[in-house]
């Protein structure tokens, strides 16, 4: 395999990935796993693409909230519209960091505003908006279009796993309908394998088969213990490979393998201030658990020869 | 194709199926659909296997309720334990028939009792119990083990569709975890393509990756308008073939195809008192809609040369 993970440096991390894939595909070996059970699950934000200075989907949603506040002045002194309109990233970023440190208060206020954007939106329109946003907008710090903010080494890992009979899923705290807008195009992951947070739907009868509309009500928060729950709801199999980067991925990483299957748990560590970002906020617990459990950590700085394509 | 749907008689129904499959697989034709979008959805009870004199899963659950009442005499004068213990099929069957006619009262009482069975059950145990039940128990009227109560012509249809690049899903009002116990074995449908009603889960941390347990709380009722909603939640594509038999399948049948895809809607009509059952209760509305919309009806009596294998 001349093109074996070309953007990965020759470190123990790359070796651990190769050894694991070799062992589960070795038909006579003790760790052989049949292809139908070669389930690989990937967090999205911070694992497959950038999540700093804020989630890419959050940028999308804040622009929509700001547009709402332009049309309705009464919203301008209320959170989250005020922060969205004034680009108050301290308040916004803090909401997420606090969440991963156990304080949900500001995140709930933020979600409450975001939910109002969903009411009555046809799913096809949500996806088309997401696709257009990712195609056309740029990252606020890195000199890149959003569509190029995906990690080239992780793309190579997805293709390498596929070539070895794995079935890749996204399992993200991000919005499922948002990600479905570009998952096939950006990651080569088909829409039925995109698992994420979602609002509730309603089915509206009508001509041409009716429509599925979003409602202003959370249905699933695919984060923390919600990740193994959603993996069982949608796949009904334990993953044998799980990749994440934040405390919200800890239960998904712990769930991999289980009593009867081998597992490779991969933790992306953001330690590359030159090429991406250097932070551990929101990942403190998963980093210490990875050390205690012997999970495979991916140092962006040391294990990747290239970050973006 | 010498074995083309051998248990189907040469009627317009068989011809409609063949014509549809030919048209969506004809790469140069106007109705061509690429394989990734050849989604076929099948109701289970009354569509893939028998649902009379009561749902097979209901027999399973009633035995467990009766066993509960044996252990706790205070339950014996309460519904649904009383009906379960006394095998009061009039009350039990009426709960379901009334539901499809718009009255949910008794069904809610029945479900309330059933939910108590779920609390704290590990999903693997639920599946193993279901598998054992289907393997070992027999239909109360037909002289058949439950595992042989599946319709041979529908099995042939599943295989015929697969051979033509279709991806088959079960989309049933029945319990998802129950069906996962035997869907691969009986229908050749893998567990990740079983969509059904389900209780909520909890993820319990622990050794060996923790466990997924059921809770005594409904999460999804996959019936009526819930079927297109769950199809979008889990697949995110409109089916191009949908098969059902009761009013609860109407929205799923109407949802197939939609504005941009062709569709074949199949309605199994139970009109065969000699070989199976003859009833329309709970299917009144979908039968009249099928006639109005020109959907393809499957007469068990006329279109199937053999019902069971």
Image: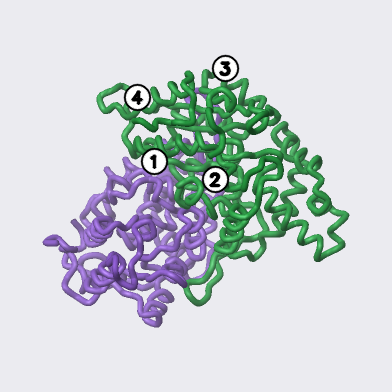
Chain colours: A purple, B green
Residue A218 image point, x, y percent? 55, 50
- What's the mark number on residue B23? 4
Q: Which residue is mark 3?
A: B292
Separation (CA) of disc 2 from disc 4 = 35 Å
Q: Is residue B241 visible?
A: yes
Q: Chain of mark 4?
A: B
Label pair 4/3, CB-CB below 8 angstroms: no
Question: Do discs 2 and 3 share a chain?
Answer: no
Q: Chain of mark 3?
A: B
Question: Residue B227 at what x, y percent from top left?
Answer: 55, 39
Mark 4 vs mark 1: in front = 4
Q: Residue at x 29, y 57 (%)?
A: A165
> Marks 2 and 4: which is nearer the front?
4
- Where does the image place residue A181, in percent across and percent down from the top left? 36, 43
The chain carrying label 2 is A
Q: Residue furthest bottom?
A: A292
Label 2's element? strand
Spatial CA distance of label 2 from label 1 is 16 Å
**Could you tell me which secondary element the residue under label 4 belongs to?**
helix
Tag of residue A127: 1
Estimate the spatial distance between the alpha carbons at disc 2 and disc 3, rounded to whole Å.
31 Å
Viewer-closest of A15 and B177: B177
Compared with A47, B219 (above or below) is: above
């Amino acid at each position: 395999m001349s093109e074996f993970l070309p953007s990965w440096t020759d470190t123990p991390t790359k070796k651990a990935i190769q050894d694991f894939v070799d062992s589960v595909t070795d038909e006579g070996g003790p760790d052989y796993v049949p292809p139908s059970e070669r389930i690989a699950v990937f967090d999205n934000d911070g694992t497959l693409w950038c999540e700093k200075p804020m989630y890419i989907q959050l940028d999308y949603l804040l622009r929509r909230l700001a547009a709402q506040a332009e049309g309705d002045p009464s919203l301008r002194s209320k959170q989250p519209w005020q922060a969205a309109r004034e680009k108050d990233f301290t308040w916004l970023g803090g909401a997420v960091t606090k969440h991963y440190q156990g304080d949900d208060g500001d995140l709930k206020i933020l979600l409450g505003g975001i939910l109002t954007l969903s009411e009555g939106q046809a799913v096809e329109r949500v996806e088309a908006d997401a696709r257009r946003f990712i195609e056309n907008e740029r990252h606020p710090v890195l000199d890149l279009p959003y569509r190029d903010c995906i990690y080239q080494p992780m793309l190579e890992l997805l293709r390498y796993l596929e070539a070895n009979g794995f079935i890749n899923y996204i399992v993200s705290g991000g919005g499922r309908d948002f990600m479905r807008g570009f998952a096939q195009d950006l990651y080569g992951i088909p829409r039925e394998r995109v698992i994420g947070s979602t609002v509730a739907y309603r089915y509206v009868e009508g001509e041409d088969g009716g429509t599925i509309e979003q409602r202003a009500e959370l249905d699933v928060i695919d984060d923390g213990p919600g990740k193994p729950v959603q993996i069982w709801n949608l796949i009904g199999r334990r993953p044998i490979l799980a990749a994440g980067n934040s405390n919200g991925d800890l239960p998904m990483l712990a769930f991999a393998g289980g009593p009867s299957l081998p597992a490779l748990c991969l933790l992306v560590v953001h330690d590359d201030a030159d090429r991406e970002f250097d932070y551990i906020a929101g990942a403190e617990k998963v980093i210490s658990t990875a050390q205690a459990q012997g999970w495979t950590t991916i140092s962006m700085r040391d294990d990747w020869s290239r970050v973006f394509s």
